[in-house]
Image: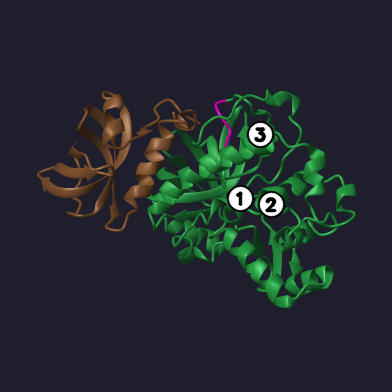
Amino acid sequence: MDTSSPAAIVNGEILNKFVGRRVRTVVQVQRNEGGMVFGQSTDGHQLTIKSAMDIPVSHFMEVYGIAEHNQTIRAEVCTDFGPNFDAKAFDGLCKLANDKFKHLFL
Amino acid sequence: MYGGGGGHYDGGGGAANANSLFGGGGFMPSQSTAAPESSGGGSLSKVGPERADAAAAHREADHGRGAASDDKSNFAINSVEVSTIRLVGRMLGKVERVTDVAFILDDGTGKIDVNRWENESSDTKEMADVNDGNYVIVNGGLKGFQGKRHVVAYSVRRVTNFNDITHHFLHCIYVHLELTKSNSRLPSQINASTGIPGHANQVRLPNNQATTFSASGNTAGNDVSSLVMSVFHDPAIIDREDGITVAYIIDRLKLPEEVIKEVMQKHIDDGNIYNTIDDLHYRSAMNG
């Protein structure tokens, strides 16, 4: 069992607390320009994902990566979550996982 | 379990895998005991692999804190013994061998080795459906060997509804709250909540408590739902491999068939019970 490099579950607002660290989030793809994905976080922030895979516009994309900046993530792994993902529930999870129950996740 | 207090874990995702033994189900703490001396009684840990969810979400078998670490797989979290767990994460490093498949599960909080024995052709088929990079739901037993933890999977299903991932972690939080809450309950209270006379005399605390957990969403511990589960957890029945039939439960509880069938269906949906040898026989998923 290896728990040496957990990824914090973040939304757009919480991302800035993890700059330089490993994070995971979900964005809704708005446009894709040669490996750079511009998307909206589950709390409405505009995020840029570098080295992202090609995922259709309007689909939700999960990203594991390093937070380079408070609005930029360098992707390590991307997963297409499809067009029907409950962003609100995920956003609620982000808040819980970084507040009262942080000790369970990091 | 999921139903009573936590809602349905699998949502729509489990339906596609209904043929899986544990498809659509979940596990809340199945065995609760007084804190083993070796458990340390420490705080709960995390959600990840170790933090497994037992349904569960996570019964976090944390970083060594709190858990007995012998090779007999007695892990305790907050004094709640952990045996069956559920993890949701990405499959990595899948290695197919003659009799089993080994892989690493990464759920974002950590990585843990998982082994799935392929005893039946259905096992092989299930494992052929999942590959590296896929999100999977793993139900299995938490084991320890030579000081290292791993999971022996009972079922490995590909995630088709990605809301299941969100739901899993929310369920982990729920289970954590249940475990910490249940820890403060006295054994006498737990026994009192099971409805079958005479049952309280049987020292089968783990299962009694499991009944309590499953009924956590109800205001009373001795409602029909709990009564049905109490029948499954009767010491004379719990070890039956084939389980019991609906007719047996109706006869035992002397309650209307429609009521029993409705409650049974809910327990099936929640993963509290599952079919055994045919469509008529059911067994509790909390047998450990």
Badges 1 and 2: C-beta atoms under 8 Å apart? yes
Q: Which residue position is annotated with label 1?
A: B27
Dot 3 amino acid type: Phe
The correct choice, above or below, for B229 with respect to A95 in the image is below
Confirm whether circles 1 and 3 share one chain: yes
Residue found at x 39% / y 42% = A92
- Marks 1 and 3, how far apart at CA: 16 Å
Q: Give how far across and how far down residue B273 sits, in percent.
A: 66, 61
- Which range of residues does the magenta coloring cover? B59-63
Q: Which chain is brown?
A: A
The residue where tag 3 is placed is: B75
Residue at (51%, 59%) from the top-left corner?
Answer: B124
Residue closer to the observer: B197 or B208: B197
Q: Please tell me in which quadrant of the rendered image residue A82 appears.
A: bottom left
> Could you tell me which chain the residue with mark 2 belongs to?
B
Q: Earlier in the sequence, mark 1 or mark 3?
A: 1
| Residue A106 image point, x, y percent | 44, 28
Q: Residue at x 58, y 38 (%)?
A: B177
Residue type, mark 1 in image: Phe
Disc 2 marks a residue whose amino acid type is Met
